Image (cartoon, helix red, strand yellow):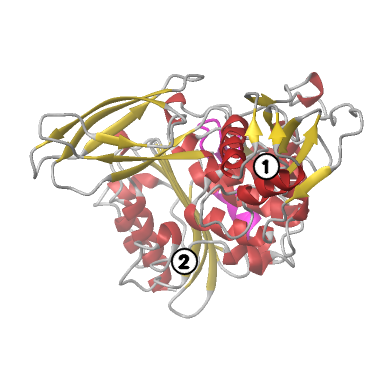
Amino acid sequence: MLVLLPLLAIAHSPAAAAPPVEAPVASAIAQAAQGTRLGLLVVDEEGREVVAIRPDERFVPASNTKLYTTAAAFALLETSGADEAAGASVRLEDGDVILSGAGDARLSSAADCTRDCLKDLAAAVAQKTRRVRHVIGDDTAFPDERWPAGMSWNNMVGKYGTAVSALTIDDNEVALSVAPGAVGGSAVVAGDGYFTIDNRVITVPAGGKRSISASRQPGSDLLRLTGTIPAGTAPYEMRVGLDDPAHRAAWLLSGLLREQGVTVTGDVAVRHRPLMPGDDPDVRGTAPAARAPQPQVLAKLTPPPLNEDLIHTNKVSQNLHTELLLRRVGAVEGSGSVADGQRAVRRVLDQAGLSQWQYDFADGSGMSNYNRVTPRGTVTLLRWGATQKWGPAWRETFPVAGVDGTLSNRFKGTLLAGRLFAKTGTLNASNALAGYMTTASGRTFTFAAYANDMPGDVSATKAIDAALVAVAEAN
């Protein structure tokens, strides 16, 4: 049955007449706060519109952007086998240790690490020599573009806005623990010494409120913690973002080398590749000029299959990993710049049949407020993706309603629990959900829903979820 809702005004006008199937959808959408701009397109297996509200208007998609980036990754990168091309490596160069990254998102410094481990690279150096000079983090595999255009600066200190680097370690996050001290006194902060901590967190009586914030000026290693923590509570574990992941990785490697008995006489340093004119968004990116032959690599890690990381990326909406995917698809035919990644995504979307006015992207993850998509463009991508050989694997990366990922607590107790597979999105005054759902009659519908401009940044997820349930129940 074709049901069109051309005007959101219907949802805010209880007196407006509505056909029987249209009324529940309009009623559900009316849950959105007054002033919200909402777009929704639902189509059936044949592509016929079931519901259409502002299907061709442009919306900030938030993390729905990851649908586009991960589709390009499936289309352009080998995802099923070991991810050999992306692994980090170490070599010796004139007495220095060079730790090089190639886009691997999973390199770990954890003591209990079992694969893709920094400690294995440290062991390779220790087997070769017992004395080194500088320990250098090299992320020149990609140009130095650590944050996307249009990302709010205040996100930089948190894990969701940590810097992007070809040499990534521990998701480019630093773990801290904040425990209560004596009432009225400072909390007890524990870390690994990478940041200088300005601790202004106060311990309040039991039953008080825990409220802890972190701030740091860009380029500074001074991390200021403020707020309160109640006495008698468990330590609060928090993770903060980095400005220079390559430096952090080299710093950690330097510590591991010392633990393995290697004397480090020099400093921790970095090598970055500046963004060059050839990487300009209006000019095809070019690979960096060939350098002199490098000394032989002592050891190179082989990460697990990329498909495993794609599942993690979409299920939990991992920003850093998606940004690395954008640069990796950009390195297929270019320099690995953001602009090259955007060109690669555009080639895939051209194949999918999208028009370029239906989308604009400044990043790969959705942290940028510059991104725009239309519901129809996203539905077009989803329907095309379902026809590709990698389509089933792509769909497997989507959160499942009421089951896992960012949808684990949504749609519970409804018809769509376990029957809706979709990518979420949340940003300043933006909510998104797009994917596939199975209706009451067993049909598979494709949908894209976006809400922007909510007053006071009030969430519109309940309205979106209720509208989709209403569509599923009526079909």
Q: Amino acid at mark 1?
A: Leu
Q: Which residues are magenta?
A: 363-382
Q: Secondary structure at mark 1?
A: helix
The answer to whether 260 appears left or right of 340 in the picture is left
Q: Is residue 59 visible?
A: no
Up/down of 328 relative to 438, above or below: above
The answer to whether 432 appears left or right of 127 in the picture is left
Q: Residue at x 31, y 57 (%)?
A: 28
Position of residue 29 measured from the top left corner of the image (x, y, whole percent): 34, 53
Counting residues from the N terminus, which is met first, the one under dot 2 or under dot 1? 1
The disc at residue 326 is 1
> For this rendering, which residue is in front, 94 or 279?
94
| Quadrant placement of the C terminus | bottom left
Bin the neighbour count of mark 2 within 10 Å (Cα to Cα): few under 14, some 14-19, many 20 and up. many
Mark 2, residue position: 400
| Quarter of image, res 239 | top left
Bin the neighbour count of mark 1 within 10 Å (Cα to Cα): few under 14, some 14-19, many 20 and up. many
Q: Residue at x 43, y 56 (%)?
A: 406
Position of residue 344 measured from the top left corner of the image (x, y, whole percent): 76, 42
- Residue 372 lies in magenta, yes or no? yes
> For this rendering, which residue is in front, 209 or 407?
209
Q: Amino acid at mark 2?
A: Val
Q: Secondary structure at mark 2?
A: loop
> Mark 2 and mark 1: span between their CA atoms?
24 Å
Number of numbered discs on residues: 2
> For this rendering, which residue is in front, 69 or 15?
69
Q: Is residue 438 visible?
A: yes
